[in-house]
Image (spheres, rainbow, N blue to C red):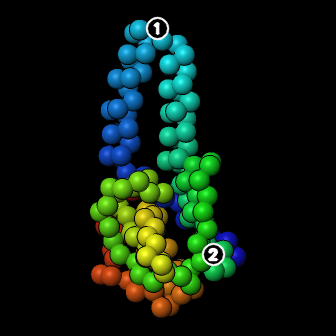
């Protein structure tokens, strides 16, 4: 059975993107740079698509992470060794700042932000009970 978990979306992240893009839009319109405006619209569509379509799918023993239309990766859940909350700001398939970090064998890390973090973690633990959860996670941050 396939279960899809959507990424939460932080309003602060959306506001930051808007604060960066809106002045550029205004400048392009003011200077009548229509080619630049068209390219900016295309860029905005990709950003919005990435925010809205970031999701994590669990099917069997596989975790598939999709971030936008181009980025899709698969991970073996049996290779996950640890789950912990993180405040890392590094680029990740996570549209929220309420993030968790999965550690995998071979020193790989994966940062995600599922809306239903505890349900997502419990699902992973049912598949791989050897995963260590540090420290106990609670989902107290509101997401859309």
Location of residue 44 in the rendering, given as x and y in whole percent from the top left corner = 50, 33
Q: Which mark is residue 32?
A: 1
Mark 2 → mark 1, Cα distance in angstroms:
49 Å
- Pointer 2 or 1: first along the chain: 1
Q: Secondary structure at mark 2?
A: strand
Q: Position of residue 73 (x, y in %)?
A: 60, 63
- In the image, 41 versus 139, the foreground residue is 41
Crowd tier of the residue under label 2, counting other residues whose Cα lies within 10 Å: few below 14, some 14–19, many 20 or above: some
Q: Is label 1 in a helix, a strand or a loop? A: loop
Where 9 sits versus 123, above or below?
above
Residue under label 2: 62
What residue occupies the far bottom of the structure in this picture?
130
Query: Would you say residue 67 is visible in this rendering?
Result: yes
Q: Quadrant of residue 112?
A: bottom left
Q: Residues within 10 Å of mark 1 (few under 14, many from 20)?
A: few
Query: Are dots 2 and 1 in contact, CB under 8 Å?
Result: no
The quadrant holding residue 103 is bottom left
- Residue pushed farthest right? 1
Left or right of 99: which side holds 125?
Answer: right
Q: Residue at position x 55%, y 35% from top? A: 45
Q: Quadrant of the N terminus?
A: bottom right
- Tell me where residue 22 appears, x and y as whole percent: 38, 26
Which mark is drawn over residue 12? none
Give the residue at x 35% y 32%: 20
Would residue 122 be visible to someone looking at this image? no
Q: Tell me the residue at 55%/39% (across/down).
A: 46
Q: Residue at x 48, y 91 (%)?
A: 130
């Amino acid at each position: 059975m396939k279960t899809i978990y959507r990424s939460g979306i932080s309003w602060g992240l959306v506001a930051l993107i808007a604060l960066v893009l809106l002045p550029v839009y205004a400048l392009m319109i003011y200077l009548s740079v229509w080619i630049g405006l068209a390219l900016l619209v295309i860029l905005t569509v990709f950003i919005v698509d990435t925010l809205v379509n970031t999701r994590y799918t669990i099917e069997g023993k596989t975790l598939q992470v999709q971030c936008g239309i181009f980025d899709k990766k698969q991970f073996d859940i049996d290779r996950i060794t640890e789950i912990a909350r993180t405040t890392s700001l590094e680029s990740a398939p996570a549209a929220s700042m309420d993030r968790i970090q999965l550690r995998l064998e071979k020193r790989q890390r994966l940062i995600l932000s599922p809306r239903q973090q505890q349900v997502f973690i419990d699902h992973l633990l049912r598949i791989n009970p050897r995963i260590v959860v540090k420290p106990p996670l609670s989902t107290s941050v509101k997401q859309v």
